[in-house]
Amino acid sequence: MTTVRINDRDVELPEQATVVDAVAHTTGRELTSTGAPVDGGRLGVAVALDGEVVPRSRWAATELSAGHELEIVTAVQGG
Amino acid sequence: MEIAPLTIGDYSLRSRLIMGTGGITDLSALEKALVQSGTTLTTVAMRRYSPETKTSVFSMLERLGIDVLPNTAGCYTVKDTVLTAELAREALETDLIKVEVIADEHTLLPDVIETLEATEQLVDRGFTPLVYTSDDPAVALRLEQAGAAAVMPLGAPIGTGLGILNPHNIELICSRAQVPVVLDAGIGAASQAALAIELGCSAVLVASAVTRAQDPTAMAEAMRLAVEAGLHSARAGRIPKREHALASSPEAGIINPLEDLT
């Protein structure tokens, strides 16, 4: 297992987990390998890895390792 | 009166009333208010995903066919603002961003220095920034020169409901701007929304005034009508202001009781 920080919490993910796995774990939604929800809806989520945005097109290719810090954000009520 | 869509960058804004979604916990009450407001563009904030966000405001807006305007609320620096904007673009698939860089949590006033720098960087990165700013006409002009697609001066500090504290400044900003001016923050009552449009603003953003009203749905309707009234009023061409009275009844043919007594 690999321990990464997601939204300021330690999360255990399988070895060689990618950003797709981290997003699926956090949102509880099943995702295709391209990061699209299997249910066909919009995900409305973005990811920053160590302060840099990871575009969805690179989620599957971005492997996570111990100590990585992820921010997984979405739209909430505001302004 | 036909109200033409407002062009902000490449975006076409149909309703001149932009709504906020904060300040209300009951999502179904928010939905009713948004529908009643007739808004076609509504702000959201970007925050860490939490399990409760599943029935999110985002899916509600999508269902209602209302476009999202992500903001950078909570940002104090250029760096945080740019990262938040990038995350918003990635998550919501829009180039629109309401740039909001706050100086401190007590006043929630915009830090115009950071705001200007953030605007420049966001323009370079291909965003369409709608920029929240103070009611300083010089700053508004600088933001426009930096590439702001719209400038959004405050009427009064966020959430105060004090209305438009310096109508002269708002009017001056509008008279010189080549980009749309959207009155943002401070509105409490519908009359103030109408005033904003009469002063020359192209649109109005309202959040707390509706979401924290005793009856948000009724206030949403009032705001919609006020913005419409403001647009009618602005187009109709108001009379010039005068120092002294000018009678509207004819002066000829006035009876003169004093004369009759002589």
Image (tube, grey):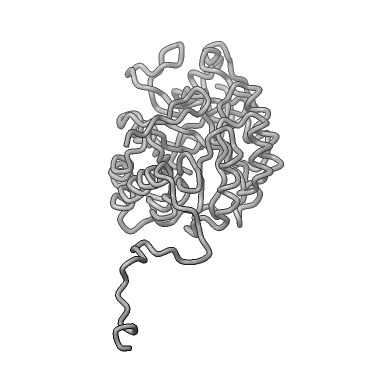
Answer with the quarter of the image where residue A35 lies.
top left
Residue visible at 39% across and 39% down in the picture = B52
The residue nearer to you, when weighing B163 against B112, is B163
Q: Can you say whether B66 is above or below B223 in the image?
A: above
Could you tell me residue B17's position as x and y percent? 40, 41
Report the number of discs.
Answer: 0
In the rendered image, the residue lying farthest to the front is B262
Q: Can you say whether B252 is above or below B205 in the image?
A: below
Q: Can you say whether A21 is above or below B55 in the image?
A: above
Q: Is residue B120 left or right of residue A79?
A: right
Could you tell me residue B256's position as x and y percent? 32, 78
Could you tell me residue B35's position as x and y percent? 29, 40
Does the image show residue B160? no
The residue nearer to you, when weighing B23 against A41, is B23
Q: Is residue B243 left or right of residue B232?
A: right
Does the image show residue B154? yes
Could you tell me residue B199's position as x and y percent? 50, 48
Residue visible at 66% across and 38% down in the picture = B141
Q: Which quadrant of the rendered structure holds the N terminus of chain B?
A: top left
Q: Which quadrant of the rendered structure holds the C terminus of chain B?
A: bottom left
